Image (cartoon, grey):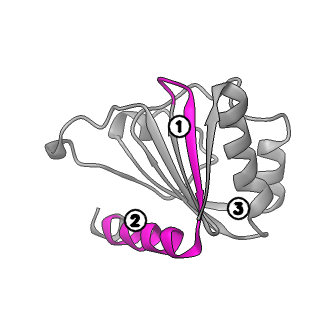
């Protein structure tokens, strides 16, 4: 596997940009979001344009609080039940293509793993949970 450690807003921005740059038109990416981070400073000027032009689809698992405050451009989110405790670590996990990324917005650090088997494994775990919510 290729593992990259990224720091600061620019490092996180690079992860989000990699999502839209790596995926083909109509592809789906998967996210776990434990708290809604402010995206200001974390997205490039072209991120939304590319995401919309490529018609990228997104499935997410998040908290109820986030679900009711997110932009209408994201469909397919499901709620992590409160009975499992607060879902508020301010962490985001992205699964896309052959990659898995973890972002800690508190420390502004990210880890990007590029490995087909790991990405497929994470996607299967995501879909099992997603289908049960």
Question: Label 2, on which residue?
Answer: 126
Q: Quadrant of the N terminus?
A: bottom right
Q: Residues within 10 Å of mark 3 (few under 14, many from 20)?
A: some
Circle nearer the viewer, 3 or 1: 3
Question: Label 1, on which residue?
Answer: 70
The first of marks 1 and 2 along the sequence is: 1
For image coordinates 58% across by 74% down, the residue present is 116
Question: Label 3, on which residue?
Answer: 56
Depth check: give the residue in front, 113 or 32.
113
Residue 25, horizontal then vertical, whole percent? 79, 69
For image coordinates 14% across by 44% down, the residue present is 83
Q: Residues within 10 Å of mark 2 (few under 14, many from 20)?
A: some
What span is in magenta? 105-129
Residue 12, horizontal then vertical, whole percent? 65, 35
Depth check: give the residue in front, 109 or 18.
109
Residue 10, horizontal then vertical, whole percent? 73, 30
Q: Judge from the rendering whether residue 61 lies leftward or rightward of residue 84; answer left or right.
A: right
Disc 1 from disc 2: Cα separation? 20 Å
Depth check: give the residue in front, 66 or 98.
98
The first of marks 3 and 1 along the sequence is: 3
Disc 3 from disc 1: Cα separation? 17 Å
């Amino acid at each position: 596997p290729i593992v990259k450690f990224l720091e600061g807003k620019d490092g996180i921005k690079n992860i989000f940009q990699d999502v839209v740059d790596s995926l083909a038109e109509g592809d789906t990416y998967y996210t776990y979001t434990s708290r809604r981070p402010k995206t200001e400073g974390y997205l490039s000027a072209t991120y939304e344009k590319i995401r919309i032009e490529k018609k990228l689809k997104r499935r997410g698992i998040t908290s109820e609080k986030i679900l009711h405050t997110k932009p209408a451009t994201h469909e397919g989110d499901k709620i992590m039940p409160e009975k499992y405790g607060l879902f508020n670590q301010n962490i985001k996990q992205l699964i896309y293509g052959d990659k898995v990324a973890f972002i800690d917005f508190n420390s502004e650090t990210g880890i990007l793993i590029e490995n087909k088997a790991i990405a497929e494994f994470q996607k299967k775990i995501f879909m099992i949970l997603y289908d049960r919510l």
